Amino acid sequence: MDVQIGEIYEGKVTGITNFGAFVMLSAGKSGMVHISEIANTYVDDISKHLTEGQTVTVKVMNIDAAGRINLSIKKAVEAPVQSRRVPQQKPVLTKSDDEIFEDRLKQFIQTSESKMSDLRSSRDRRGARRKK
């Protein structure tokens, strides 16, 4: 039986290294699962995810010129569906040019009044020092 790229097979873990795990496929061929292809989460220690003799489902990702078979466990199984809250769309309210102008004018007036107040208070403080 020939191994085909993109196909999913059952296999047994025959060895674990610090960079991946070797899997003997049911087709009688052996391949390697790189550490980055073991799980959908970060894997720092492969032995936390796999043990020798464990049966795994793998997908054949590539077969290089030397005949080495690259496998993936995480692509062989469906990725867990993460529950994402989809924000409800608020109705889009468009403002007229007059309303936009009025909003900007109000903002300008508030900023201006705040700056003038700060200027007056600093001027009053300086004047109080000079009188001493």
Image (cartoon, rainbow, N blue to C red):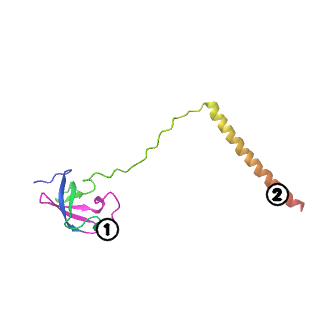
* Residue 112 in the image, given as x and y percentages of width and height: 73, 44
Amino acid type assigned to the residue bearing label 2 in the image: Arg
Q: Is residue 121 left or right of residue 48?
A: right
Q: Residue at x 22, y 57 (%)?
A: 71
Which image quarter: residue 48? Answer: bottom left
Q: Is residue 128 left or right of residue 36?
A: right
Residue kind at label 1, given as amino acid type: Asp
Judging depth in this view, the residue of 19 and 103 nearest the camera is 103
Q: Label 1 neighbourhood size at 10 Å, few (<14), some (14-19), many (20+)?
A: few
Q: Which mark is residue 125?
A: 2
Q: Quadrant of the C terminus?
A: bottom right
Q: Secondary structure at mark 2?
A: helix
Residue farthest toward the left in the current orientation of the protein: 1
Where residue 63 appears, as percent x and y from the top left, is: 19, 56
Q: Does residue 94 appear left or right of residue 113 in this picture?
A: left
Q: Is residue 42 magenta?
A: yes
- Residue 65 visible in this rendered orientation of the protein: no
Does 53 appear in magenta?
no
Q: Residue at x 71, y 43 (%)?
A: 110
Q: Classify mark 1: helix, strand or loop.
A: loop
